[in-house]
Amino acid sequence: MTNRERFINCALGRPIDRSPFLFYFGPWGETLEAWRKQGVKDPENAWRQGFGFDPPVIMASSAVNVLYSPAYQPEVLQVNAHTKIERNIMGQIVESRLDGDTIPHVVRPPVTNAEEWHRIRDERLNPDDPARFPADFDQIVQQWKNTDAPVQVGCYPWGLFGTLRDLMGVEECLYAFYDTPELVREIMSDLTDFWLALYAKICKVIRVDIFHIWEDMSGKQGSMISTDMVRQFMLPQYRRIAEFCKQHGIPIIQLDTDGNCEGLIPVFAKAGINMMMPFEVTDGAKSILQLRRDYPAMSMQGGIDKRALAGGPAAIDKELARIAPLINTTCYFPALDHLIPPEVTFENYSYFVRRLREMIFQG
């Protein structure tokens, strides 16, 4: 069985010879710095080299500019004693600590009204902008075709709720569903128009296996918006995506949302989404084992508690024993439940990967 066949079969609930062995999430930037201090050479690549991973998913966004074109240019606007205020590549004006230890606070989002959205849409989201494709795109496509790995369109930070939140800010986004619902619908429809027009160009030159949607719309208590709102605002666009995938032979629609996402699983499934990730291990959330039993038709990636890696071999073995019943079963991709935190040493990470590989390849 080829790696691509194994990945697709696993996602679709078909027979597999073993679990796919690859990770979607790597280390946080702070983790890379910690590993560098521990003596790890080239930590940006060391976390995925020498472990015998399957070939990684080919991200079309690695060659095609699927973001803003032209991009926002980062600009420092003000520097204070402990913080700085800057415009980032997403057009947000954010305040962050100089030591980089916290998530930046959004001072002003790029969209506060319809006029600002129209300006971004018209000036930066033209799918026909020739600058989106490199001059050597044909050669890159040929390299992709020669690689035994699935091909993905869609990436962070593109989603319906996820991008709306980045455009408007968290609180403003949530209020917008009540205060300016037509603008919310317009933005989600426009984003979908952009994605489908751009991804259709990619589908013309290479077979695509995965349509990825990034949402990050769940916390410990569940979804940030009600399932009724998901149905009203998001499902019409998801159904357009599902129809696009059907027309272009894309078998997997994968959705990424953090936190406790159980309440969203049946809603997303009805829209055609058949794979979700990363199933964070949080208080109150069901374990990945229970979720697999409750929603057998939804393929799942993740569910291994990243925090256990900080506890050393004994804690790692205990966590792997917990998820062992899912190893080498279809519809499950064994992986950590998010990015690797800085308290995890490279030694512990390496132990985890080696043990997981043994479980997959030795049964």
Image (spheres, helix red, strand yellow):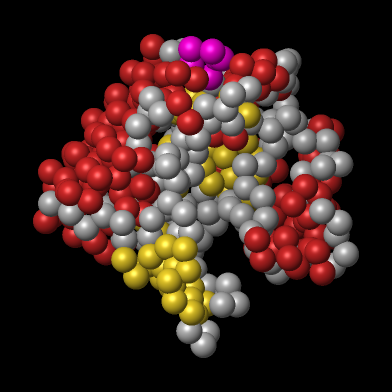
Is residue 262 in view? no
Looking at the image, which residue is at 24% across and 61% down?
172
Looking at the image, which residue is at 86% across and 41% down?
50
Considering the image in quadrants, where does the N terminus appear?
top right
Give residue 137's position: percent from left, percent from top: 60, 22
Give residue 167's position: percent from left, percent from top: 32, 53
Query: Where 155 sits versus 113, above or below?
Result: above
Give residue 215's position: percent from left, percent from top: 40, 46
Looking at the image, which residue is at 84% across and 67% down?
38
Taken as a whole, is the magenta stretch helix, strand or loop? loop
Residue 204 falls within the magenta-colored stretch: yes
Residue 198 falls within the magenta-colored stretch: no
Residue furthest bottom in the image: 81
Report how many numbered discs are placed on residues in the image: 0
Is residue 112 in view? yes
223 left or right of 280 in image: left
Query: Where 240 sits versus 309, above or below?
Result: above
Query: Where 142 sits versus 36, above or below?
Result: above
Q: Quadrant of residue 169?
A: bottom left
Considering the image in quadrants, where does the C terminus appear?
top right
8 left or right of 161 in image: right
120 left or right of 21 in image: left
Query: Where 237 sits versus 112, above or below?
Result: above
Q: Quadrant of residue 360?
A: top right
**Magenta residue span:** 203-208
**Between residues 258 and 117, which one lies in front from this camera angle?**
117
Give residue 331's position: percent from left, percent from top: 56, 30
**Between residues 87 and 360, which one lies in front from this camera angle?**
87
Looking at the image, which residue is at 37% across and 48% down?
162
